[in-house]
Image (tube, rainbow, N blue to C red):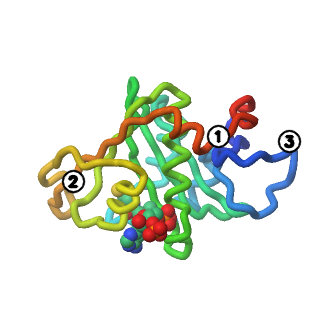
Amino acid sequence: MNPENNRLYDGRPRAQGSPDDGQLQIHVMAVSDIPGVQVIERHSFPTPWSMRAFVSEITENDCAHYLVMRKGQLVVGYVGMWLILDEGHITNIAVHPAWRRQGVGTRLLKAIAAHAYRLGARKMTLEVRRSNYQAQALYHKLGYSTIGVRPGYYLDNGEDALIMWKELNRDDYQAVFDIRDRDEL
Ligand SMILES: CC(C)(COP(=O)(O)OP(=O)(O)OC[C@H]1O[C@@H](n2cnc3c(N)ncnc32)[C@H](O)[C@@H]1OP(=O)(O)O)[C@@H](O)C(=O)NCCC(=O)NCCS
């Protein structure tokens, strides 16, 4: 098993070997998380990714990085990114409807930005549907700006994508990982 699968990504210290006590915690996505991820995916997107797509991303794609937030064994949200040179491209983020508006998306987005920064990224980018005001509000709140449009980007309905962008700096890293945790990463 990849030891990263037990690594915490929300900056909260956890004693080695302590049981998962049902607190919300961020981990690297494991294959065993994918059924829970797919439930959220189906609640969240008109054309959900398949099981195979997620398995391929986390087992075969070297530039892909996926995190999940779990409460105990329950997956409540996830986020994915491709790291290409010094740019992190958000591929996917979703939170279970029952867990929305409780800061989960914010924590996941901060965690993936910190993870990206640690791996050398200095910019983050993403595409979002023009009509997806909720997600745009989340991204704006975390410092992303709209820098362009991809007309007709979404094949299911021909909707435009807004391209959003954010420069990363050390604060994005330190906001999530304190000094003590940094030594463990
Ligand atoms: C977008 C999404 C990931 C946000 O997750 P979340 O856990 O609810 O987000 P948070 O609780 O961290 O919200 C952070 C901020 O985002 C904005 N926001 C989130 N949901 C919102 C909503 N329904 N209406 C307006 N603003 C919203 C607010 O500014 C919010 O801050 P506030 O609660 O202090 O006002 C979630 O709504 C989701 O899974 N949507 C479906 C999938 C999706 O659209 N993914 C994005 C693809 S680009």
Rendered residue at 73%/43% (across/down)? 6
From this viewpoint, which residue is outermost toward the bottom?
Answer: 98
Name the amino acid, label 2: Ala
What is the crowding at mark 2: few (fewer than 14 residues within 10 Å), some, or many (at least 20)? many
Residue 42's mark? none
Task: Give how far across and how far down residue 22 sits, in percent.
Answer: 76, 64
Where residue 132 appears, x then y in whole percent?
Answer: 29, 65
Residue pictured at 50% horizontal, 57% vertical: 106
Instruction: Provide the secondary structure element on which disc 3 rests.
Output: loop
Give the residue at mark 3: 16
Which amino acid type is marked by label 3? Gln
Q: Quadrant of residue 25?
A: bottom right
- Which quadrant would the N terminus be assigned to in this image? top right
Q: Position of residue 135 (x, y in %)?
A: 36, 61
**Residue 68 located left or right of residue 2:** left
Question: In the rendered image, which residue does mark 1 sit on?
Answer: 177
Looking at the rendered structure, the secondary structure element under dot 2 is: strand
- Please state the horizontal and vertical placement of residue 137, each as a whole percent of the image: 35, 62
Please state which of the two labelled residues, at mark 3 or mark 1, is closer to the viewer. 1
Circles 2, 1 touching at the beta carbon (< 8 Å): no
Q: Amino acid at mark 1?
A: Phe
In space, the residues marked 2 and 1 are separated at their CA atoms by 32 Å
